[in-house]
Amino acid sequence: MKFYQRLKEKKWFAIISNVYVLTVTGFVIWMLFLDTNSWLTHKELNEEIEKLEQQKRHLKEEILKDKATLNRLRDPKELEKYARERYYMKKEGEEIYIIEYEDSLNTNQ
């Protein structure tokens, strides 16, 4: 009993055991960690939003590159060049020789 009496006389114990302090502390803990709209949930969602925005920026850059390629391929000469380089297409009667350099070969086996 003496221990509890001495503890009650301490100023910090009186502040901590105050009903309002306990209520506010419980509310803060609830809102930060336990609620469905908690700080942890918001943190995870913000990280996901940042990742999606990064992906959006990357895809917009890819779209711009593709648009530039499409505009370039409107020219018949560029279209022919692209088809020959990319898909190894040829005109009738032509022969294609593919030359690979040693540094471009995958020799790690």
Image (cartoon, helix red, strand yellow):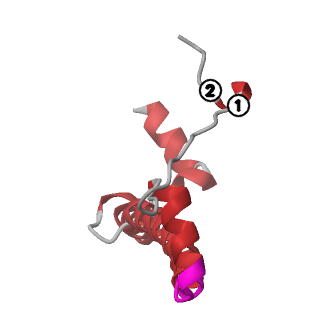
Extreme residue toward the left, this view: 36
Question: Which labelled disc corresponds to residue 101?
Answer: 1
Residue 6, horizontal then vertical, whole percent: 54, 40
The residue that mark 2 highlights is 105
Residue at 41% across / 61% down in the picture? 92
Query: In front: 54, or 31?
Result: 54
Name the residue type under label 1: Tyr
**Residue 85 visible in the snapshot:** yes
Name the residue type under label 2: Leu
Q: Quadrant of the N terminus?
A: top left
Q: Are marks 1 and 2 in contact (CB under 8 Å)?
A: yes
Q: Secondary structure at mark 2?
A: loop
Residue 42, horizontal then vertical, whole percent: 42, 68
Label 1, label 2: how far apart the Cα atoms are: 7 Å
Residue at 52% across / 89% down in the picture? 74
Q: Secondary structure at mark 1?
A: loop
Q: State the image quarter where residue 87 is shown.
A: bottom left
Query: Where 84 falls versus 97 (above or below)?
Result: below
On the rendered structure, is 69 left or right of 93?
Answer: right
Please tell me how many numbered marks the rendered image carries: 2
**Residue 54 visible in the snapshot:** no
Residues in magenta?
Answer: 71-77
